[in-house]
Image (spheres, helix red, strand yellow):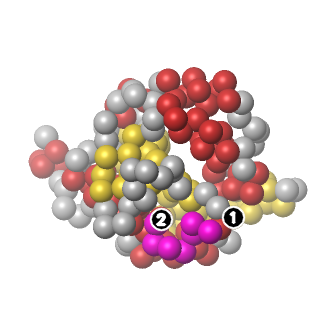
């Protein structure tokens, strides 16, 4: 089981008791725009997902972790590596913190830092990327803080409530890896 500890939070593998938390996040229409969700999820589907969450990132091509403040409190958010591509040593990265009361408290920042370190030092990834709506100032600032660079904008990329919105692609290259290091 993966557990990564920071100064104020830790990120851990998903557990069966995360069912209601994930069900709530996946069905929170206020964040569907950032999570690229289009339809509600049933508890049955979330339960099936959790039953397969033990799969290795090399099998599932993704890794979803819960963001927690300590062992006695439930998850506050989720952080993911997705579209894992071991041939090219890259993955997408995304984060969501549930509830406005949990945002702007350095939780997302600390979780992102932990997962970047894990991706670069344990998975030996060469690059991470994030797809972020150009209007999402908080996420743009968060990823920029950690050195992600906006490398382009996909015009009219996402249809949200009848309006096409632009999406930026941010990229972080691990300058400490080379092909010879990974071989």
- How many numbered marks appear? 2
Horizontal arrangement in the rendering, residue 30 relative to residue 154 (left or right): right
* Residue 148 placement (x, y as % from top left): 42, 68
Dot 2 alpha-carbon crowd within 10 angstroms: few under 14, some 14 to 19, many 20 or more: many
The residue located at (12%, 48%) in the rendering is 180
From the top left corner, tell me how far across and down residue 103 is, in percent: 57, 69
Residue 98: quarter of image: bottom right
The answer to whether residue 172 is seen in the rendering is no
The magenta segment is 101-107
Labels 1 and 2 touching (C-beta < 8 A): no
Measuring from the top left, give residue 73's x and y in whole percent.
48, 52
Q: CA distance from mark 1 to mark 2?
A: 23 Å
**Quadrant of image for the C terminus:** top left
Magenta stretch containing residue 78, yes or no? no
Q: Which mark is residue 108?
A: 2
Q: Earlier in the sequence, mark 1 or mark 2?
A: 2
Q: Residue at x 69, y 56 (%)?
A: 31
Tell me the crowding category of disc 1: few under 14, some 14 to 19, or many 20 or more residues within 10 angstroms, Cα based.
some
Judged from the image, the secondary structure of the residue bearing numbered disc 2 is helix
Quarter in which the N terminus is drawn = top left
Q: Is residue 69 left or right of residue 1?
A: right
Disc 1 marks which residue?
166
Look at the image and tell me whether residue 99 can be seen. Answer: yes
- The residue at 44%/54% (across/down) is 68
From the top left corner, tell me how far across and down residue 80 is, in percent.
Answer: 47, 48
Who is closer to the viewer here, 120 or 87? Answer: 120
Against 55, residue 72 (above or below) is below
The residue depicted at 36 percent of the width and 66 percent of the height is: 8
| Residue 136, image quadrant | bottom right
Q: Which mark is residue 58?
A: none
């Amino acid at each position: 089981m993966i557990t990564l500890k920071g100064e104020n939070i830790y990120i851990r593998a998903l557990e069966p008791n995360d069912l209601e938390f994930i069900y709530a996040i996946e069905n929170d229409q206020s964040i569907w725009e950032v999570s690229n969700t289009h339809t509600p999820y049933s508890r049955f589907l979330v339960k099936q997902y959790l039953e397969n969450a033990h799969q290795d990132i090399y099998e599932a091509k993704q890794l979803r972790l819960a963001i927690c403040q300590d062992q006695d409190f439930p998850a506050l958010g989720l952080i993911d590596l997705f579209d894992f591509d071991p041939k090219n040593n890259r993955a997408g990265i995304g984060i969501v913190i549930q509830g406005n009361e949990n945002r702007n408290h350095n939780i997302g920042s600390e979780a992102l830092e932990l997962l970047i370190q894990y991706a670069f030092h344990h998975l030996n990834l060469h690059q991470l990327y994030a797809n972020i709506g150009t209007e999402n100032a908080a996420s743009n600032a968060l990823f920029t803080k950690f050195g992600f660079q906006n490398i382009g904008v996909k015009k009219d990329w996402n249809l949200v409530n009848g309006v096409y919105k632009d999406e930026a692609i941010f990229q972080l290259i691990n300058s400490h890896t080379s092909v010879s290091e990974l071989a």
